[in-house]
Amino acid sequence: MKAYERLLNYVKVFTTSDDDSDTVPSSARQFDLAHKLVEEMKAIGIEDARVDDKCYVYGSIPATPGCEDKPAIGFIAHMDTAPDFSGENVNPRIIENYDGGEVVLGESGRALKPSDFPHLPSLKGRTLIVTDGATLLGADDKAGIAEIMTAAERIINEKIPHCALRLAFTPDEEVGRGADHFDVRGFGADYAYTVDGGAEHIIEYENFNAYAAQFEINGFNVHPGSAKNIMINALHVACEIEGMLPAGQIPRDTEGYEGFFHLCDISGTTEHASSYYILRDHSSEIMEGRIATLRHIEKLLNEKYGEGTVKLTVKEQYRNMIEKIKPCFHLIENACDAVRELGLTPKTEPIRGGTDGARLSFMGLPCPNLGTGGYAYHGPYEHITVEGMDLASEIILGIIGKYSK
Ligand SMILES: [Zn+2]
């Protein structure tokens, strides 16, 4: 079976995760796909395929004779789709020999346009898969599952000699919990790749360092008519904090390796206010500087208004995986070589966010990210090509080949 045929099967299953739920998985419907995948894995010869009570699907393919001493390589993709947009009743459309131009998406009034998505003309001649405009497609990350499954099927059917392989399909990536219950030890891979990126030639191994910063501000409220030199308006102090931050270091003004402070929430009364920021930077040194800037603001304002006026709490969210990938850089070199051998030019890009692979890397499983061939995730413009999926699957086989030599 081709990878895109699998994708078309998987997108029929409604697997949207749920930010507001505290259950594991966040939505029980993710088990529907998990059970289907276990069945399919067993049918292609992955005998130990199983799903655990947390909705993590695992399976392994033992090394072929002569490859037992090679590293065990894992491939991981996620089953859920983003809660940002509907993932129910997905109705994909296949456009053969795509002309590189505008595509009207069903009756939705939406259209996929090269002016919004400048890469579209580069897909000319390929077979394009789009939505009907009413849902997302779910290529993020069901394409990753389909590509891993297709590579696994070929390894088994074509009796390709290979190192030990480990496969995992996880729930709840889109709500930031995909690594929470991942059984790294049980998985038993030395290294792994998530297959959850964009264009097939992109390899990602750098992500943001991420911190959350919460300011709690205690004001001093008196009648505004007799407030001179007495009132401390907590809301004003919250605005003062925002005004003391360096200009231009916000998401709107930054790209590539540029980090930022992002004000996500500010609320309160004269009496009490709070503001919530996220801090992002690829460099851990610059991140330390960002935290020091916030600490300095806290100190200055407490000197100005009195001790206890401003209380800052800083929490780590995730870290840049590069420090865990650098010692095993063969992961990137082998992936780049596999891309090159298919006649493509590998591209490495810093992720302006986090990945489950980043968290897994810090849990002891170094785990960069490969492309799936998909674009415009999390909304109705999501699309992918049959050829991109075939290439992504070939890249997986290429990487396996390198670790099996
Ligand atoms: Zn994803």
Image: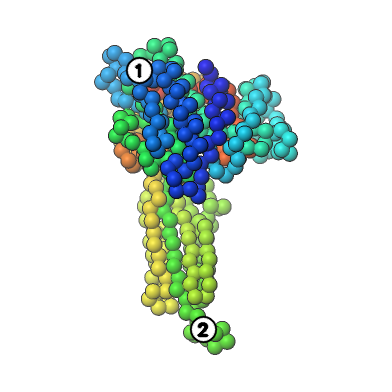
> Relative to 247, is 50 above or below?
above
Label 1's element? loop
Q: State whether residue 195 appears in this view.
A: no
Residue 264 x, y percent position in the rendering: 52, 57
> Quarter of the image containing the C terminus?
top left
Say which residue appears at 30% left-offset and 30% top-offset.
188
Q: Amino acid at mark 2?
A: Val
43 left or right, relative to 329: right
- Determine if the C-beta at disc 1 is less than 8 A from ligand 1: no
At label 2, counting other C-alpha atoms closer than 10 Å, the crowd grade (few under 14, some 14-19, many 20 or more) is some
Label 2's element? loop
**Residue 222 disc label:** 2
292 left or right, relative to 3: left
Residue 142 x, y percent position in the rendering: 51, 30
Of residues 259 and 91, the one drawn nearer to the viewer in this rendering: 91
Tag in front: 2 or 1:
2
186 left or right, relative to 37: left
Quarter occupied by residue 43: top left
Which badge, 2 or 1, comes first in the chain's sequence?
1
60 left or right, relative to 11: left
> Relative to 137, is 150 above or below?
above
The residue to which callout 1 is attached is: 162
Q: Amino acid at mark 1?
A: His
* Total count of labels: 2
At label 1, counting other C-alpha atoms closer than 10 Å, the crowd grade (few under 14, some 14-19, many 20 or more) is many
**Residue 135 disc label:** none
Say which residue appears at 48% left-offset and 84% top-offset.
230
Distance Cα–Cα, label 2 vs label 1? 75 Å
